[in-house]
Amino acid sequence: SHDCLSTQFGGEPMLYTRFSIARQTDGDNSHVEMKLSADDEEGGEIGRPEHLHASMPPPQRSGKNLCFLIIAALLLLLIGFLIGYLSYRGRMQKASRCLDGSGKCEMTPTTSYLADDETEEEEVPGPPIFYWPQLRDLLSNKLSASHLEDNLRQRANQYSFEAGQSGDESTASYIHDQFTSFLLDEVWNDEHYIKLQVKGSNNKVSILEDGKEEILESPDAYVAYSESGSVAGKPVYVNYGLKADFQKIQKLDVSLNGTIIIFRAGKIPLAEKVANAKEAGAVGALMYLDPSDYKNTDALVPFGHAHLGTGDPFTPGFPSFNHTQFPPVESSGLPRIAVQTISSQAVAKLFRKMDGEQCLPEWKGGVIGCKVMLSGTSNMTVKLNVKNVMVDRKILNIFGAIKGFEEPDRYVVIGAQRDSWGPGAAKAGVGTAMLLELARVISDIVKYDGYKPRRSIIFASWSAGEYGAVGATEWLEGYSATLHAKAFTYINLDAAVLGFNHMKISASPLLYTLLEKAIKGVKDPTKDSGSLYDRVGADWVKTVVPLGLDNAAFPFLAYAGIPVVSFGFCNKDEEYPFLGTTQDTVENLKMNDKLYALMRAAAEVAGQIALRLTHDHELFLDFERYDEELLAFQEKFLPYDRHVRALGLTLKWLFFARGDFRRATDALRRDITNSDRENRIVRRALNDRIMKVEYDFLSPYLSPKVAPFRHIIFGKGSHTLQSLLENLQLLATSRDSVDVNKLKEQLALATWTIKGAANALVGDIWDTDNEF
């Protein structure tokens, strides 16, 4: 070989091969130019050179020719390899561009331009590529209304599924077995040991007058976490128990100290009504279902809880694991007053005994003879005797998981409450049925159709939801360090069908765009044509209902900083009458027209959201939506700027922080646009910035033990933007009532939380600073 090379490059060979490799200006080495030539063009006979060195013996000629042929063959192999590699890379780039459903995704076979037209193309086996429309259709085709009906039937002919009791535990075992039969990758239980308040001996509501006691009602239902004992006071009716209702009655110079407050259900959770009553000085509270809001419920008494919070109120901020050394603390959200629910029949009887002022016109409901209070001369009082007792219970959350193939440590969680006081068909049965059907269908798509989700899906069945999302909250508290960095969406299935002619939606702004796409892709089961989007209309975002404490998605959003969506069908301006009562049965629920078709539609929306979040390269979370939320608050703050400046303070730093957040969202969008989507490391880093947006709106300056719901937009407490707005409104109307130091603190907390969210969105620490 040495002779070959030295002859080739050192003298004038008989036969030579000339190579020219041209490097292109853009750095691509793939262009190879090769020329093969022989010195037989002129002079002498074929194959004989005109100038032959006398010292070169003829026998060497065949050896040199062999070397030239070997080198030429190697070069041809190299060229073939480069052509094949570039062709394969081009096909993979095209396929990757189609994975998120964007662009043209035509699957036309590709053939080598060197191949003969008649040559049959060799098929190379590989995993199927699922484009979004194909995956969406698979989900729709596999969801079964009959399976949903079978799942809901498990709730029939059973009276109670109280948390930690036999009905709840047998359902938990059934769900565990179902998850296992669906071949989910992982199925497991999560145990918690909690304190619950249950009914002891009969609670009683009585009327005391002229030394005589008349029992008004002794209901089966009770209110968990009520103060136990016996209290008495003059009855006062306060409509729905809203803060505005209490303010209205206090303007009439009516003292509420030592009274028993009566209010009707609806508008806000029972726990908030009780907190308002306690703040006004009441010693007890009674709630009933008004016939104008809850039809055909005259004799029904609802179950409820009075804890202004979520989770076990006797381990606030701590997970209720068996080995936890519980500190001697209780939640500040416990009511400290006696609370009981009664029927509207009992309230009507009580109103007839009251001889004071008539109700305000807007306060009148379906109970005839509504009175606000007693006359000044009446000696009648209402006695409330609550005998609830505390018990220790073990509860089980049941989980199943489908693991992602690219990022298994990133999860979307789909959950539903399992327990209920009473049959709970609408409260817990519908959500549990949908949870099982989604687990079955999505597992089927993965195991048998070959879909490979990028990220994991976790299916969760919660216990003790009736007591304030206890099971879900304890899970969040127990694994908060992990979940805030790994769980990026929670989809709540509770009470998804309470009617048929309207949709109720609660969601994080991050999920507005994805939810809209989902409802556009699901047919309206109550109509012959059209989608669910046609039902809600283009302005549906304006009708989004803020999440309340009675929604299991609330702690995911406000405590853990995880984006959430919760939605369902209902009847416009009408409550489902049997929720939380002994009449929440499958038979009563079936009075809803097209019940199982509605359940299937709701499951399809939830399934589309979950699958899309595990399908696309980029997380489908619209982080730019929060800029609109912040701008809306800024516009509400602006009218109070002069009042703030009069105190020597300013709102400009808060506004600058919002501007920084806007610039940060623009920067992230540019980074995404300019990124290499095929680079998994870059893609993961960008997705991590997207999924952290919600968490960054949890104020880092507050203790989760003291203020668990730290979200400045959707949380509860003085740190929220809503609380700041209310303080500014008070500043404009009653300056002396405003605590200036508290206002300063609110401004600082809001400003630096938003600025921190902006810095986190920008990315690396060298791209951030403390300048506004």
Image (cartoon, rainbow, N blue to C red):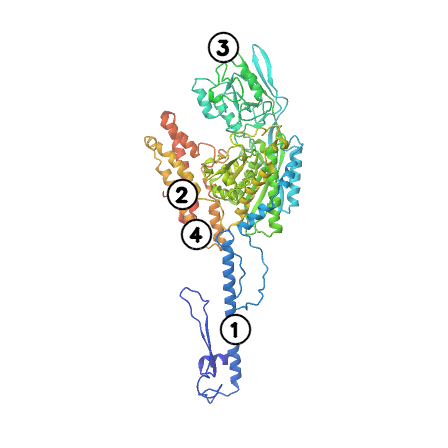
Q: In the image, which is nearer the foreground, mark 1 or mark 4?
A: 4
**Local crowd size for mark 3, using a 10 Å CA cut-off: few (<14), some (14–19), many (≥20):** few
- Residue position for label 2: 661
Q: Distance from label 2 to label 1 (Cα)? A: 58 Å
Q: Nearer the viewer, residue 296 or 408?
A: 296
Q: In the image, which is nearer the foreground, mark 2 or mark 3?
A: 3
- Residue position for label 3: 377
Secondary structure category for the residue under label 2:
helix
In the figure, is residue 140 to the left or right of 643? Answer: right
**Residue type beneath disc 3:** Thr
Q: Earlier in the sequence, mark 1 or mark 4?
A: 1
- Residue position for label 1: 74
Q: Distance from label 2 to label 3 (Cα)? A: 61 Å
Q: Nearer the viewer, residue 638 or 266?
A: 266
Residue sitting farthest toward the front: 528
Q: Distance from label 4 to label 3 (Cα)? A: 76 Å
Q: Earlier in the sequence, mark 2 or mark 3?
A: 3
- Residue position for label 4: 673
| Tally of numbered discs | 4
Q: Is residue 281 above or below residue 35?
A: above
**Residue type beneath disc 4:** Thr
